[in-house]
Image (spheres, rainbow, N blue to C red):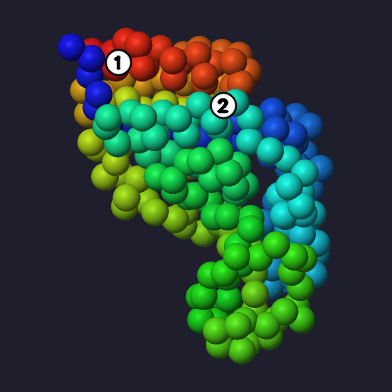
Amino acid sequence: MIDHGNIVILTGAGISQESGLATFRDADGIWAKVRIEDVATPEAYARDPDRVHRFYNARRRPLAERDVAPNVAHLALARLEADWPGEVLIVTQNIDDLHERAGSRNLLHMHGEMLKVRCGDCGDVVEWLADLGRDDQCASCGTTGRMRPHVVWFGEMPFGMERIEMALAGCRLFISIGTSGNVYPAAGFVQMVRELERAHTLELNLEPSEGATLFAETRYGPATELVPAFVDQLFTEGLSN
């Protein structure tokens, strides 16, 4: 009998890299060129909002203008979610919208979304495709100069942690795809699942992550090869016991 238990999938920058989006932590990634302290903390925004806006505007444009598209790994996960009898929750560290454009719906952006902005006064969140600056006004409260990217900066709490922890506690399979394994709390998810002693853990990555030894199973190669192949295997064989 095929086991159709619940699945939690964590995705990182590696799954979107093959769509043409730069990673953050590779040797030639974004953080090798720009200091985190200058563009990705609340203190950076308070100190130099114009610089922070320029940085995120440059990240937003390729997504808003559809210069990048979902790849077959995104599409395979959307098919898994749509057709798997159990629940499939995708928890992504990515701030792009490629999972949505591939068709995923049961999706949680724990680090926020690049195509949304948030008012620092009233907290209202709205879709935003244009450049953002200090002259932009909140449509809800009318405040000017308090709109910020709807992303989680270093030092801030990721979104949806309660829902994520509940899903991890009830899953039969945890898959980590394209992550570095050194950004917490996401890097600790595999350990949370291991402690349950009833869920299988799998890393699909281009190379071993920082936490590779914590996984019961690892497979290495491009996400566009590994993910569709593993999804096909799931539909044929079900979950590992």
Q: For the residue marked with disc 1, what is the amino acid?
A: Gly
Q: For the residue marked with disc 2, what is the amino acid?
A: Ala
The residue singled out by tag 1 in the image is 238
Q: Residue at x 47, y 41 (%)?
A: 104
Answer with the quarter of the image where residue 164 lies.
top left
Which quadrant does the C terminus fall into? Answer: top left
Front residue of 226/103: it is 103
Q: How many marks?
A: 2
- Please tell me how crowded label 1 is: few (under 14), some (14-19), or many (20+) other residues with Cα within 10 Å: some
Residue 233 in picture, x, y percent from top left: 40, 12
Front residue of 194/73: it is 73
SS type, badge 1: loop
Horizontal side of 146 relative to 12 (left or right) equals right
Q: Residue at x 62, y 81 (%)?
A: 138
Q: Give the vertical position of 225 relative to 4 (above or below).
A: above
Determine the CA span between mark 2 and mark 1.
19 Å
Q: Are marks 2 and 1 in contact (CB under 8 Å)?
A: no
Horizontal side of 153 relative to 199 (left or right) equals right
Give me the disc on residue 73.
Answer: 2
Which quadrant does the N terminus fall into? Answer: top left
Residue 102 in picture, x, y percent from top left: 56, 38
Q: Give the vertical position of 132 relative to 64 (above or below).
A: below
